[in-house]
Image: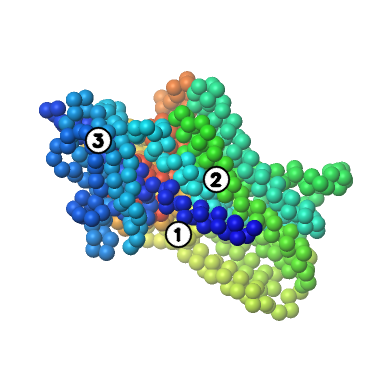
Amino acid sequence: MKRYLYCLVALMLAAVPALAQSIKWTAAVEPAGDGVYELVLTGKIANGYYTHPLTDPYTAAEIELDGFEAVGDPEDVFTPSDYKGETVAKDTYVLKQKFRSGDGAVKGTVTWQCCSGDLCGMPEDWEFDVKPSKTAAAAGATLAPPGKGSAAADTDGTLWALIIEAILWGLASLLTPCVFPMVPMTVSFFLKGSENKSRGRFRAAMYGLFIVLLYTVPISIIIGLTRILGGATVTSDIFNWLATHWIPNLLFFVIFMIFAASFLGAFEITLPSKWTNSADKNSDKGGLGGIFFLALTLVLVSFSCTGPIVGSVLIKSTQGEFWTPMITMLAFSLAFALPFTLFALFPSLLKGLPKSGGWLNSVKVVLGFVEIALGLKFLSTADQTYHWGLLDREVYLAIWIVVFSLLGFYLLGKLRFKHDSPVEHISVLRLTLAIAVFTFVVYMVPGMWGAPLKAISGYLPPIETQDFVLGSYTAPAAQAEAPAAGGPTLTIAHGLKAYDNIDDALAASKETGKPVFVDITGLGCVNCREMEARVWSDPKVLSLLRDRFIIVALYNDDKAKLPESKWVTTSSGKVLKGVGRVNAYIAQERFGVSSQPNYALLGSDGELLAPVRGYNLSIDGFVDFLNQAL
């Protein structure tokens, strides 16, 4: 059986390059005068890949027109990048070919070859069938090739490519700042499992099944209702509420603190005797209520990091797709649930090991300290979105420094709790863990004076909330306030000045001639903070943003209220009165995104200058992205 599984995995891995299209193309036709038209093919190059320009005689792209007269040679437009002395194109690559046609319609094929590192893949091709359209040319809308499916399907590749991509996203989500904290909570919950190994396996399997159902079933219902009712729903508002509203965030904070207190020995979390007796009588159910609640907690608290894939699926559901989003979400949830199912199995294996030396209680105490630290993130999210001012960055860091210092002393045996056995000697493992913990504490200390702490930036409040930064002054966190004399009203990451609405930013763009950088972000967005700490902090990026762009920051989760003059009425007649609600609506309607972070580049006329860019920690890629507007 194992041999067959290995073969299946090998086949799936071998299929990834074949299914994943290295460049995703959009096509448009623009009139060039005298009966001549220009075909414009805009390609979005996948991360980690590059292609050679037309000057390369061996690997350059080729355009073949089906029975149409080409006028002149093709041209390419791109931001030059260097790879071992060669000029290559990354991120975005544009091909242009003039042709003669009576009605401007053209069919054909573009063939190209992409490389990753020193390895180059097989040539790929994409068919196009496009007619001149002012709307399509301006927006760069994807047009369906002849004899194939919908435009969205062609742009994103085949269904299998979407499934593979969703699986990879699901596995990668485990490493994101708002998902990983659920690992100790999962292990802690299942430590209280039964001695019965088969029952432990059943509970772990149900945990994984609940995670899959909680992701797939609601999305399927929403998509089904959208199709039945014939219009888009306000799903982004619902998910935004769950991720940023004070009620769920404070609830999760309290839950984490209760679990932490229990693991530190304050009390035992037990069900009422009536529930316990009922559970004993129905032991084959495996305590499904508690397992379901844990799975629900995982899905809700991780949504701010899993939002990008879920957001793209929701957008597809409003663009005529039906089965594809459901299947893609199923693939994502299966991959996302797999590691947590294994973590749920792990405690049941621990129960079969010897318990000498009270090591199992030590594990619980360590998890208790970790949950105190991680639970602060939920309080911080509510604090940021509602501007309470409770957990500024230095306060948050001070708590973490104290908590992890106490954890280090506990590992050294200098701190004991109620059920701990005396530590007569320090094992190599405990010493190693203590060294790691104290090293982490030392790493955090400079953050009290404004050090960026890039490794944990996703967990921390924005540096703008810090009262004192050594060597510079940083204003308080961005607030929703009235524009002052037509200038920027917000101070965002690294002291950058930003407008709080697109109209004012465009007006400034017309006056200065600078393009507009739109930061679609959130006060409680962990990936946004990580982008700002690890990408924006680069001198090249920071110089471009500060000197060459007009910046507008759209906080999608800001709970501040707007004056009546700035309320927005949606196409369905709903009146939006909050800063975050309005910004989220603009992000979805104008830029087609429902997650953060996302970045857009606009000209003074408000037209997009490049495809919207999402979460990506490539500094060179971000510089290339900005240079597209310059």
Residue highlighted by disc 3: 66
Residue 149: x, y in percent? 41, 33
Q: Is residue 324 left or right of residue 341?
A: left
Residue highlighted by disc 2: 332
N-term mark: 2 or 3:
3
* Callout 3–callout 1 Cβ contact below 8 Å: no
Q: CA distance from mark 3 to mark 1?
A: 52 Å
Residue 409: x, y in percent? 65, 70
Identify residue type, mark 3. Asp
Q: CA distance from mark 2 to mark 1?
A: 28 Å
Q: CA distance from mark 2 to mark 3?
A: 39 Å
- Which class describes the residues within 10 Å of circle 1: few (<14), some (14-19), or many (20+)? some
Identify residue type, mark 1. Lys
Residue in view at x 77 percent, y 57 percent = 197
430 above or below 75?
below
Residue highlighted by disc 1: 454
* Callout 2–callout 3 Cβ contact below 8 Å: no
Q: Nearer the viewer, mark 2 or mark 1?
A: 2
Judge by depth and name the residue closer to the eye, 160 or 278.
Answer: 160
Identify residue type, mark 2. Phe
Residue in view at x 68 percent, y 55 percent = 344
Q: Secondary structure at mark 3?
A: loop
- Which class describes the residues within 10 Å of circle 2: few (<14), some (14-19), or many (20+)? many
Judge by depth and name the residue closer to the eye, 463 or 615.
Answer: 615
